[in-house]
Image: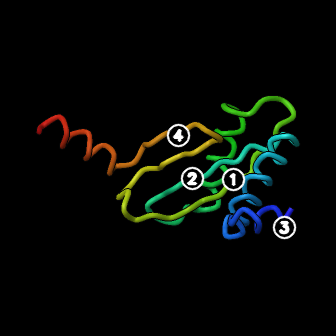
Amino acid sequence: FLAVLAENGRLSELSSVLKTFNTIMGAQRGVVEATITAAEELSAKQKKALEKAISSGYLEKGQSLNLAVKVDPKIIGGLQVQIGDRFLDLSVQSEINSVHKALA
């Protein structure tokens, strides 16, 4: 496998290939990847509430959730939620951008 990547000049893509492989294997095993981006660190209670909400609203029977939380102060407040291929932007920054576009 590595020889094929090297022959095609794609050895630098190895980390991307492995990440994609892990995602596909996780999906096969019923693991749903979710990423929450918040403006500041979330408390354990907030993480647990988000995990419960995502699990009850988006997961099917037999699926499990792999939740990652990132901090990005640029979103000012609120959350950005990526669940599989779905993206929900509830950030203050996106609201500011919407208002700015409406006024322009």
Image coordinates for residue 22, horizontal then vertical, percent = 79, 54
Identity, as a three-letter code, of the amino acid under mark 1: Leu
Residue 46 appears left or right of 26: left
Residue at image mark 4: 87
Of mark 2 and mark 1, the one earlier in the sequence is 2
Q: CA distance from mark 3 to mark 4?
A: 36 Å
Q: CA distance from mark 2 to mark 1?
A: 7 Å
Of mark 3 and mark 4, the one earlier in the sequence is 3
Secondary structure, mark 4, is: strand
Identity, as a three-letter code, of the amino acid under mark 4: Phe
Residue at image mark 1: 67
Q: For the residues labelled 3 and 4, say whether their Cβ atoms are less than 8 Å apart.
A: no
Residue at 73% across, 66% down: 14
Secondary structure, mark 1, is: strand
Q: CA distance from mark 3 to mark 1?
A: 34 Å
Of mark 4 and mark 2, the one earlier in the sequence is 2
Secondary structure, mark 3, is: helix
Image coordinates for residue 45, horizontal then vertical, percent = 63, 56
- Specify few, some or many for label 3: CA neighbours under 10 Å numbering under 14, 14-19, or 20 or more: few
Q: Which mark is residue 3?
A: 3
Image coordinates for residue 36, horizontal then vertical, percent = 57, 52
Residue 64 appears left or right of 43: right
Of labels 3 and 4, the one closer to you = 3
- Specify few, some or many for label 4: CA neighbours under 10 Å numbering under 14, 14-19, or 20 or more: few
Residue at image mark 2: 36
Q: For the residues labelled 4 and 1, say whether their Cβ atoms are less than 8 Å apart.
A: no
Q: For the residues labelled 2 and 1, say whether their Cβ atoms are less than 8 Å apart.
A: yes
Q: CA distance from mark 3 to mark 2?
A: 37 Å
Of labels 3 and 1, the one closer to you = 3
Q: CA distance from mark 4 to mark 1?
A: 14 Å
